[in-house]
Image: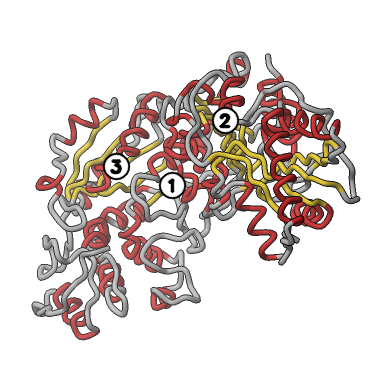
């Protein structure tokens, strides 16, 4: 039994309110359902019905975790999430499988790279984007019993770092680089690209470029203090995400900086359109999202900033 | 309350007509399901103002939420809310507007977008079964609402889960918003559609309390399948000058027209309506 389904089973056994629903998506829970009795329901390939049922169960006092591919749960069931979960703020958790770049070879129908934007746009819905399996388990223990609705970008990727075991929604973790002092670059990121961010930071540090890497964990609520610290203490803030640049982290950071009247150079790294389907490592390379590519893109930007300043311009 | 007395609750239709001014409401659809709601709340559902928070209560969900004036009229007459509160219709300081809101005592779930509450009701029915209770969940569906694929998706799942404490009631008034159902997306043969989905199917005259009582005394059938009741109804029932008319779905009458329609409701005289009514909603 993988850690995620062990966690689900533990929650169901520890609290009879917890219900596990799936829209015939059992890839990450092959063994636990048989041990959950009536607290597990497979509704079939019916995302709208799953979310409606979850709302009905939650309205009766239950805590409901729902599962489907990320693009289907957010898009097919969008109005059900907005109306039946978001408006009454019921404790339903939408767990989206193979989000973002993890859909690798499936093609654009399966590419949930607009999901964060869709979910964060709904009042009351929170968004948790763990970077790996350890991060997922640490966070899920908190949010399942938070009493709030959440969208979760699921991943079972191997741990990218040794994570902070304490988890508070809206509190990011600094996973590499200097803290609380000036540095050249801050990389703000979430999800599976954290590993690539760390590789990029390691490459840049060999060239004397100081880089702080932040794992945001939740995008809603977002850790605004860490965004503002990045704006004040870095020459460049990188927003790294496997999501459309519109309405994801880049948009969140820009909204925050404009509201707080902070001016800083920002490099967005994400998608402008759907990515080319292939196995994951080739997608990372083709879309210039590998650690090596990210390091080069950051360095190119730093060089252009210096050149601008040399000819008399200033970005800050 | 006996069934004969039930048919004599004209106050609820009066409430609906009084909400059909100063901004208006969905009058035609409300009048078609009035008798259904009166019957269910007075004779079938085990729920009262005193038990609206009891986990053992029966539940009614208005999936075709635009007929909420009928529900609020029933609530006012049965003491769920104060009668005077209906005067707050469309006032920003209250929650009485064109679709149900959970801040109104007795409303189990909000609605407005069609095709949602059969699945919500299914979730509630599953919870009731898990708790070992014998409560029933009734979901009122519009016949036009049956265009929504999510209704049939929920039908499949309810059948698969063998949820037999769930009763869907179709307010079969034969109208979509603006046109007759059979002229747009034909639903017939409707009984065989539900039968093919594995549901128990019952047909009833939705305005005949004896017919309703004869049927609902037997429901739900505890045979491992959900039940649908197709209730034949008439849009605008009780007020001849606006019944069966495509242009009397959403109505915003003058105060004088409301008074005339109430006279018509009581058989005193026929109303003459000149207000244009909005059909774009």
Return the residue nearer the eye: A203 or A255.
Answer: A203
Question: For residue A164, which quarter of the picture?
Answer: top right
Position of B269 with respect to A136 (left or right) is left
* Numbered tag placed on residue B148 in the rendering: 3
Q: Viewer-proximal residue, B101 or A129?
A: A129
Q: Nearer the viewer, mark 2 or mark 3?
A: 2
Residue neighbourhood size for the residue with mark 1, other residues' Cα within 10 Å, grouped as few (<14), some (14–19), many (≥20): some
Q: Earlier in the sequence, mark 2 or mark 1?
A: 1
Quarter of the image holding residue A298?
top right
Q: Which residue is mark 1?
A: A79
User: Which of the image's four quarters has the C terminus of chain B?
Assistant: bottom left
Tag 2 residue: A287
Q: Secondary structure at mark 3?
A: loop
- Residue drawn at the location 86% of the way across and 31% of the way down: A206
State the separation of the CA atoms marked 2 and 1: 31 Å
> Which of the pair A161/A299 is nearer the observer?
A299
**Chain label for disc 1:** A
Chain letter of disc 3?
B
Residue shown at 30% from the left, 38% from the top: B149
> How many residues crowd mark 2 within 10 Å: few (<14), some (14–19), many (20+)?
few
Q: Is residue A298 above or below residue A234?
A: above
């Amino acid at each position: 039994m993988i850690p995620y389904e062990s966690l689900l089973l533990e929650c169901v056994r520890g609290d009879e309110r917890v219900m596990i629903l799936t829209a015939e998506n059992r890839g990450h829970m092959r063994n636990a359902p048989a041990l959950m009795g009536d607290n597990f329901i497979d509704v079939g390939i019916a995302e709208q019905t799953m979310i409606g049922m979850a709302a009905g169960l939650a309205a009766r006092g239950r805590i409901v975790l729902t599962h489907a591919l990320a693009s289907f749960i957010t898009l097919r069931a969008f109005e059900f999430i907005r109306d039946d979960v978001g408006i009454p703020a019921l404790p339903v958790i939408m767990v989206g499988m193979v989000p973002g770049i993890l859909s690798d070879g499936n093609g654009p129908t399966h590419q949930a790279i607009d999901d964060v934007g869709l979910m964060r746009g709904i009042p009351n819905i929170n968004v948790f984007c763990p970077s790996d399996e350890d991060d997922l388990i640490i966070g899920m223990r908190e949010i399942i019993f938070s009493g709030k609705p959440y969208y979760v970008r699921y991943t079972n990727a191997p741990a990218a770092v040794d994570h902070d075991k304490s988890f508070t929604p809206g509190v990011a973790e600094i996973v590499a680089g200097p803290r609380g002092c000036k540095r050249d670059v801050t990389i703000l990121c979430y999800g599976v690209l954290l590993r690539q961010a760390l590789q990029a930071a390691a490459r840049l540090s060999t060239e004397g470029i100081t880089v702080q890497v932040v794992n945001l964990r939740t995008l809603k609520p977002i850790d605004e203090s860490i965004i503002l610290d990045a704006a004040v203490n870095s020459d460049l803030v990188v927003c790294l995400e496997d999501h459309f640049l519109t309405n994801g982290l880049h948009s969140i950071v820009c909204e925050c900086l404009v509201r707080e009247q902070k001016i800083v150079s920002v490099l967005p790294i994400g998608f402008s359109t759907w990515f080319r389907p292939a196995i994951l490592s080739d997608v990372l390379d083709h879309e210039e999202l590998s650690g090596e590519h990210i390091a080069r893109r950051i360095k190119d930007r730093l060089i252009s900033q210096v050149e601008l300043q040399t000819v008399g311009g200033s970005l800050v | 309350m006996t069934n004969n007395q039930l048919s004599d609750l004209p106050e609820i239709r009066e409430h609906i007509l009084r909400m059909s001014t100063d901004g208006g409401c969905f009058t035609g659809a409300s009048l078609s399901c009035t008798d259904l709601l009166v019957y269910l709340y007075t004779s079938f559902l085990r729920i009262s103002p005193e038990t609206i928070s009891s986990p053992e209560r029966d539940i009614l969900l208005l999936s075709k939420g635009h007929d909420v004036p009928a529900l609020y009229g029933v609530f006012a007459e049965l003491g769920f809310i104060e009668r005077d509160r209906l005067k707050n219709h469309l006032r920003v300081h209250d929650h009485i507007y064109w679709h149900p809101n959970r801040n109104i005592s007795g409303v189990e779930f909000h609605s407005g977008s069609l095709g949602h509450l059969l699945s919500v009701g299914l979730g509630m029915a599953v919870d009731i079964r898990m708790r070992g209770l014998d409560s029933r969940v009734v979901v009122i569906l519009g016949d036009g609402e049956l265009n929504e694929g999510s209704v049939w998706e929920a039908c499949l799942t309810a059948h698969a889960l063998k949820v037999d404490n769930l009763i869907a009631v179709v307010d079969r008034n034969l109208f979509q918003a603006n046109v007759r159902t059979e002229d747009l997306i034909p639903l017939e043969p409707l009984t065989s559609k539900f039968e093919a989905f594995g549901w128990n199917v019952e047909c009833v005259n939705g305005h005949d309390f004896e017919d309703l009582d004869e049927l609902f005394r037997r429901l739900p059938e505890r045979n491992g399948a959900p039940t649908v009741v197709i209730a034949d109804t008439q849009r605008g029932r009780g007020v001849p000058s606006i019944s069966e008319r495509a242009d009397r779905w959403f109505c915003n009458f003058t105060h004088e027209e409301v008074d005339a329609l109430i006279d018509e409701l009581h058989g005193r005289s026929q109303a003459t309506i000149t207000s244009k009514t909005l059909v774009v909603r």
